[in-house]
Amino acid sequence: MCPFTKNAELLDALEPQLENELKQISGADSLVELVRGAIQQQIAGSRPTTDSIAQNLRMSSRTLQRKLQEAGTNFQQVLDDTRRHMARYYLEHSVLELSEAANLLGYEDVASFGRAFRSWEGLTPSAWRETHRLSAVN
């Protein structure tokens, strides 16, 4: 048997498995993006829950949790990551008061938002905003 024929047979045998794995990887990424989008839609003035996001995505809460786990993350991580990105955007691109930003991000008060932001960025929201405004000017 020719070595090329053997390789072709091996590739033919592996192709369905590789395609399935690629679909799972792509599906995982798109699921996380769908969850982020649903969180962004629900976050203003409230805190999205696993149940509310799962309902929005037309699946059970348990299925959502399982699929996120398969994607290497969990709901809290996606929520925190979404809040972090939104917070950075709000602070860098708007003149929102910190209390308004906190409300838009689903925090009950500015102090909770401040603690979360400080854990993400190592600075208070005000200090981060000032630093980024200065770097944008320079």
Image: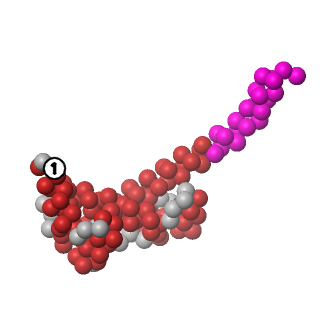
Instruction: Locate residue 23: give its quadrant.
Output: top right
Q: Is residue 132 above or below residue 118?
A: above
The one of 122 and 100 positioned closer to us in this rendering = 122
Q: Residue furthest right?
A: 1
* Residue in view at x 66 percent, y 40 percent: 18
From the viewer's perspective, is residue 23 above or below residue 132?
above
Q: Residue at x 76, y 26 (%)?
A: 8
Most common SS among magenta residues: helix
Q: Is residue 93 left or right of residue 71?
A: left
Quadrant in which residue 81 is drawn: bottom left
**Which structural element holds mark 1?**
helix
Residue 24 at x, y percent in the picture: 60, 48
Q: Is residue 44 above or below residue 111?
A: above
Q: Which residues are magenta?
A: 1-21
Which kind of residue does numbered mark 1 sit on? Ala
Give the percent coordinates (x, y) of residue 2. Answer: 84, 20
Q: Quadrant of residue 10?
A: top right
Give the left or right position of residue 128, taking residue 58 as reference: left
Q: 138 left or right of 86?
A: left
For this rendering, which residue is in front, 41 or 25? 25
Q: Is residue 108 magenta?
A: no
The residue that disc 1 covers is 136
- Image point (15%, 61%), residue name: 130
Q: Would you say residue 6 sits in the magenta stretch?
A: yes
* Number of dots carrying numbers: 1
- The answer to whether residue 100 of the structure is visible from this angle is no
Mark 1 burial class by Cα count in 10 Å: few <14, some 14-19, many 20+: few
* Residue 115 seen anywhere in this rendered image of the structure: yes
- Estimate the x, y position of residue 97 in percent, counting from the top left: 14, 68
The image quadrant where one finds the N terminus is top right
Residue sitting at x 17%, y 67%: 126
* Type of colouring: secondary structure
